[in-house]
Each structure stands twice: as C-alpha cells, then as structure tokens.
Image (tube, rainbow, N blue to C red):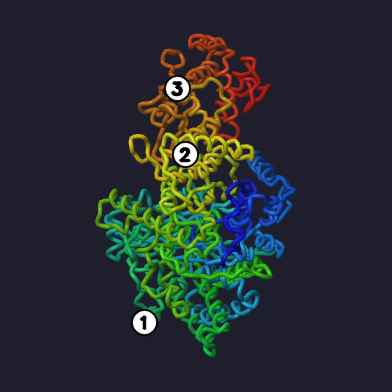
Amino acid sequence: MDSDDSQEGTGRVLGEEWFPVGEVSVESMRERIPGIDYPPTNRIHVWFARRPLIASRAAIASSLFPVGIDRRIVLKTLAIPHDRDVVGAHEEVLRAKAEKRKIKSPFDWPQAYKVPIGEDIHRMLQQSGIDHPVILDPFSGGGSIPLEATRLGLDVVANDLNPVAYFCLKGTVEYPARFGTRLIPEVRAFCEKVHREAKAELEEYYPSGPHEEVYSYLWARTIRCPQCGLTIPLSPNWWIARTDKNKTAIRVISGIDSDTCTFEILEDPENAGYDPDCGTVSKGGAICPRCTSTIDGDAIKTEAQAGRMGHQLYCVCTKIPRSRGRGKTWVFRAPTEEEMFALDRLGDLDSDRLTALKAKGLIPSEEIIPGSKTREPINYGMPHWSGLFNPRQLLAHATYMEKYLEAKQGLFSILTPGTDEWEFATAVATYGAMVFDSCVNYNSIQGRWHSGRTVIVGAMDMQAFPFRWSYAEWNQIVKDAGYEWAVEKTIDSLTELIALMPETSGNATIINADAQALPCEPKSIDVIVTDPPYSNNVMYAEVSDFFYVWLKRLVGDLFPVQFSEEQTNKTDEAVANPARFKGIKKGQAKNLADQDYAAKMEASFREMHRVLKDDGVLCVMFTHRKAEAWEGLAEALMNAGFSLQSSWPVHTEPGEKFGKANKGALKVTVLLYCRKRENHRPGRWEDVVEEIRHTASYKVEEYSQNGITGPDLLVSVYGPALGKFSEYYPVKDVTGAVRGVGDALAIVAQVVNEYLTGDVQGADMETLAYLNLLRIAHGVTLEYDLARVSTVFGGNTSLEAMDVRGGSGLVKKTGSKVKILTAKERFAEGVLDPHRPQTFSNLIDVVHAALILYEQEGLGSVSRILEETGKDTRDAGVISVLQAITTAGEGGSADLVSEARIASALLEALGQTPSGVGRSGERITHWI
C-alpha cells in the first residue's frame, strides 16, 4: 500500500487545479431525471442523501490524476464524450422546456454511469504516480464513493458508523463484485420460496372480487367528536385520483342514525358540486363533518395517547382488465363485507395470530427513542415501532419474516462459517432482507397515497416520521405488485450493479466504525474522498431505526457485531441533534448540538489526518453553500491540520442552469480538495488579506474563462482563497484579535461581486449590490444567506441597509427568504417617490424612478428627473444599469420580465440598443 518513494511529493493532482464542472454537472443531473431509471444504488435499498455516481467517480479520479494529464483522458475515464458540447446540449433542453416545445434529445450518448469501465482506464489510473493506491471513505453511507472506487479498479475502505448503512454497503459494493451473476438465480429462488409459503398463509386476509386485483387500501385515522359522538375519519383531502384522465374522489357521508361515517365514490366530483380539497383536517385540528365543531391539535394528541385513535378503511384500489386493448385500468370502490370481516378477524394486536407471532419475537417491541425526527409518532400515541403498522401490515411482515427465517435456516444448514459458500449464502440472505425492507418501507401507516400518480409513496420519502392523518396500505401478496414488485426491484438493481462491475474490480473492505477512531494504520491511506454528514440535515440513526428493528431479527445472526444493540448508535453520530440535550432550554440545546457536531467533525478530520499519507489528498464533498457552513467546515479542517486547495461546484438536480439557480437555492455538491498543512506560518491579517484578495482575483478570472459564473463562481473561489488563509491559520490582526474564516470569506465575496458587476459603469456600491442580487437570483426571491454574501461590496453595503425596514427599501426580508423589490413594488411599498428626487440616495433610485415615470408619463418626465438629479439621457451609469436590468430579466420571474421590458423600451427611447429582454424593435405599446 506504500507509494513509490520516487513519486512522493512530486506535484499537485488534477482536482487542485482543474475540474470538468459543466460536464460532470450535466451527467450528475442525468442520473436524476424523472422517467429515466435512477442508478441501482438509489433503488436497491433506502439510504439518505446519496451522491451522484459520476460526481463520485470524478472526485476520485481528480484526486489521482496529475495536473498535466490530457483532459480527454479525464473525460474518457468519466465516460463523457470529449467531442460533444455536453453543456450546450443541457442548455438546449432547458430552452425547449422553458418554451414548452418538444425536441429530439440532444444527448446521443448513454448516461455516463452506465458505461462499462475498461481495463485501459485502470491502467491509466495506476500510472498516476501511486502504486496500488488505497481509497478511504469514512462516511460511506449509501456507497456511491466506494462503488465508483471499485469500478475504477482501486482498493477501497468503506466505513460507516450506522449498521443499516453497513448492511447497504455489503449489498451495494462488496457482494456484486465478489459473487457476480451467480447471485441472481439464488436470490430469486430464495425470495420465491419465502413468498410462496407466506402467501399461502395470508390469502384469507386479502379477499378480492372476480376479475379484479386489489393493489391498495386507503385508510383514515379516526377520533370521536366530543360534541356529537361521531367517529371522524381524518384526512386533509379526499382525492383518490387527480390526473389528467381521471378525477376520482371520496365523499364522506355522516348520517344521524349512525356514529360511523360511510363513503361514496365520486368519479366526477366537480360535476357533483363537491370539493375534495375540503377535508376533515385543517391546521393540525379536526372538523366534524356532522356538527361542524372543531377539535384542536392538542386534544387530538391527548385522545391518541390515551389509545382512543382508530383506523377506518374508506377505499379499496383495484385494477381490472381494460374492455378494449391490453392492460388494466383503475377501479376505486368501497370495502366489501368480506374485506371488513377479514379485518375484524384480526381485530387488534391482541388477536391470536398476532399474539403468537409476537411471542416468537417477530414483531418489533422496541420503544421509539424520542428525538428530532421521532417525536411525532410518540405525540400521536405510537410509542413503539410496531405502532407504525396496522394489524394486517404487522401480520404480513411477521409472516414473511417467519418464512424468511425458515428459508435462511435451510440455506445455511450444511455450510461451515467462514467459508466462501457461507459468505455467498450471507449475500443471498442480505438481498432477501433488502426485499423485506422494501415491503416495510411501502407498507406502513407512514406510507401515503399520491393521488396525482395513483401510487403509494414510501415511509422514507420524508426522512422523518410526520403524522399521517390518512395512509395507504398495499396488498403484499397481489400478483406483480407488493412483495413480487419488491423482489423484481431488488433483483433488477442487483443485476445492474453486477453489470457495472468491470472484469477486474478493486477490493472493497467494509467496516462499521466511528469515523473518529478508524481501524487503519497511521499514514496508510493514499486518498480520502468523503461526503460527511452536515449538521441537522438528516438524523441518520433516528430514521434508520425504522429498518434496524426488523433487520436485527432478520440478519442479526449474520452480522452479530453490527446488530448487537437495541437500536442504532446515536451517541457517537456526527449530527447536530438538539434532542440529545433534552431538559435544556430549546435555544441552548441547539447551541450545544451545534457544538457537539462541530467537535465530532473536527475529531473525524483529525483522524483522517492521522491515517492519510503525508502526500495524500483529501476530497470533501460538501452540499451546502451557506457561509456559516463553510466557516464551520473550514475551521474544522484547519484545526485538524489541513489546508484547503480548491473547490468545485457540481450541480446535482435536473432543470438547473449553470450559475443561475431557482430562487437562489443552489442544488450543488461542492468538491473541496485539501492537503496536510506542511508547516505553520504565523501571519498578520493586514498582510494575509492582500494575499487572499490576490488569489481570489486571479481565480475569478481563471474560472470565469472556464464558464463558471454567478453563485458557482463564488463557491469555486472559496476553496483556493481559504487555502491561502489556512497557510497562516490562526491569523491575528495588529490588535491581537483572531480573525476567522468569516472575515476571509467576506473578502472573497467582495472580489467576486465586484467582478460580476464590472460591466456596470459609474454605480455606487448599493446599486451594484442590488444588481448583483438580480443576477444571482435569476428571479426576485432567494435565500437569506446567499443574498447576504451577494451584497458584500465593502463599505456600508449590507442587506440590513437595503431592507424596507430601516433601509433604502431595495429588498424585503421575510423569514429565511429575501425578496428583491422591483421599481413598481418599491413605489407600492412607499419607499420610492419618483416625483421627489431629493429623496434619492443612490443610482438605482434614479433608474427605478425613471422606469415608473416612463411607463406612467413618458420620456419627457424621464428627461426632467434625470436633469434634476444631475444626469442626462446619455449618462453612462443610467444606461448600464438599465442594460443590467434587461439582461437580468431573461428567464426570470414575471415581475422581473415586465420590468426588463420597460427598461428595454426606455433604452430604445433614449437611442440605445437593449441587450436583454425586449430587444430592439419592441415598443412599449406592444405589451402595455
């Protein structure tokens, strides 16, 4: 594993100097386009916040390839064609989408992640200067990074603290490469045996009529009305199908002769004068459909905790053969007497059948541990994990588990532990457990019915456990759905994973350890590529307990160390979870949680520093662009002994334009390349700031020439600029005060913002800040943090100084969002009077006043106001600001487009040629 001494310290890797941002972004987004299969890693088993495969491969390859490598080789390694305009093809699709026209796909090459990786790629990587490099991912999660490392022929150590993630890694990374296609028939045979035997015992509980197949059951939770005694079925709406071709809904019928509601199926609710959006739940409370009294949310929780909340089946979703042509069509109906009798036989958890299964330990009895994502079930009377399933769902899962355990016993009956055949049987059982977990995900009272798609959405859709007023149950034994669908999904995913593996793959070592204490020798790792958890984004341990309590019973004997505890390890997990500090005031608990997270991340980075070779590379994938997040990450890295070298933003969500993201909410994964800091050079802030400014200015020019712009440009420059800061960390000023990462980021923001507005002549800083917001947002609304860094121009510019409350009235902050006000909106807010030039405080005030006057009164009034403010119709500042407004309107919101058109018309009236929306030839009368 040692590198060749002659190669040590010979130079920088590609990712420190260059990265194919546009190409990798496009291919990452192509992995997530609706209508095209997601990668098999995303389908084989639920895990959270998986990174795109192609972004992961690019991160690894760019950590190994030397700077001088032919970039065509880089693109070949990523299976991206070097002779196509990849970014241009993406932009063509976006234009067609915006114009609502269909085009032939410009992508005449396969999705990059699907292309087999040849031995020639392995050889090129081996020639990168490191002999048999070893890759480490300390936070492997769903396995994107280690999978791509093995596909590149590299040895990888994949670690995760969470046992469910460890289980996923075995099935995603290790077993497909190790056992290959011989797994497929054995997994299928194993699952078919389980299904055949479980189905025989469950059929009586899933009756169906002639010529129909029952797929789903729609349920409402119920409480008793304290005023009239009606059992109220709870649902925020009563839609069953809400598609272009099908509008079907439920009407709740509450009579005076019974305290139980009945239900009517309406195939055309609008024609019947019925609004299905008027449910029995509103703002967390209930509305009685009979007496119209309301029950507040606290009273509902009290009833639920007292065990007085029930379930009522209100619709059965079936399919029958089409009368014409092939295929089946949906038929929604009320439950039959036979179906109700089957449910009555189960009764509740005390029924004989369920009691027997519970006695065998096949039903999870563990209490739900109160946490940030697990409070709601407890609040609504479900303190145990078994409470997230109705009696028939529990019966189905426990019966399938019973048959799974019997089949597993037969699988291992003549095998010897530790042999290859034993490990192969373990792999087969692992995929059988993955099938089971798919059923658990889609068959609980956390599943919801999606009326727009007429499908069940799984419990893990939210990565939390919000209370479901109504829920969907699936028929686990129906043909081609239920368990059979879960089997096909798992086998299809496994087949694709095996197909992705090259003839000679790298060796994957899967470990289950704390990232703060890795079982690796010092300086034994060549490259670390990792996507660490971020703050409170996902509470992995809390949420994965949903699967853990079942997996412990399914495969706990196969993985005894990983599944030895009652539930997952929440103490050592690196997330900011205020629930761990219960009993402390809310604000203090959050602060303690943030501090706990920061300490654990720093300890994890220190451990990475310990195991990484001195000339090794650390690449951190970072999914947040907030300045405060950057501060925390950068400080943790620098305290751990790393220096930052470069940062590259990769877009991961379809429908984005590079440099311009919807409402300022960037869906990017930032790749941050780091090295061990070689020596400590104390520096004074007054000197260091000039180096930061110089580095930022140089990188702004370089990256913008490579097509990086807008918020992406800011994120890209963060890395190298902070790298300069990290060389002198910690930095003090002449007074002895320590200057932090935030101070360095402010300098970077100022350099980037000044560059982005360099085309605007003669404008004051506040006007530049306003125009930069328009360009960054590509609309009129963006997130506060992005708005804040986009208004850094030095001097006194700030969001607060621009706000309608106490400022110049250019923006309006509402919660975590910032709305950029157009001229009309400022006039409506009363912060701009175009007839009082003495109140103008900046150039944008003059331009906004001119826009209002031109629309309302004409060019004469514009000339007058310009003269009164010391301008004229040829003023360079006025003209350049108007031009900036016209270009900011391209593809923006309706308000911004409207303002851009007025600006274009005014420019023409002033004898200028507009460069953006409403180009030359349009008159104001064309659209006013």
Tag on residue 786? Answer: 2
Percent from the top left, x then y, of residue 411?
A: 54, 85
Binning the other alpha carbons within 10 Å of mark 1 as few (below 14), some (14 to 19) or many (20 upward) gives few
What amino acid is at disc 1? Ala
Q: Is residue 393 left or right of residue 923?
A: left
Q: Nearer the viewer, residue 722 or 280?
A: 722
In the displayed structure image, the side of residue 196 where residue 308 appears, left or right: left
Mark 3: few/some/many CA within 10 Å (<14, 14-19, 20+): some
User: The C terminus lies in which quarter of the figure?
Assistant: top right
* Residue at position x 45%, y 32% in the image: 792
Q: Can residue 78 be seen by looking at this rendering?
A: yes
Q: Position of residue 813 (x, y in %)?
A: 40, 34
Q: Give the mark nearest the N terminus, 3 or 2.
A: 2
Identify the mark nearer the N-term, 3 or 1.
1
Residue 379 spot, x, y in % from top left: 31, 59
Cα distance between the residues tagged 1 and 2:
56 Å
Quadrant in which the N terminus is drawn: bottom right
Closer to the camera: disc 3 or disc 2?
2
The residue carrying mark 1 is 359
Mark 1 and mark 2 lie on one chain; the one further toward the N terminus is 1
Q: Is residue 485 visible?
A: no
Q: Residues within 10 Å of mark 2 (few under 14, many from 20)?
A: many
Residue 25 in percent (x, y) is at 61, 49
Which amino acid type is marked by label 3?
Phe
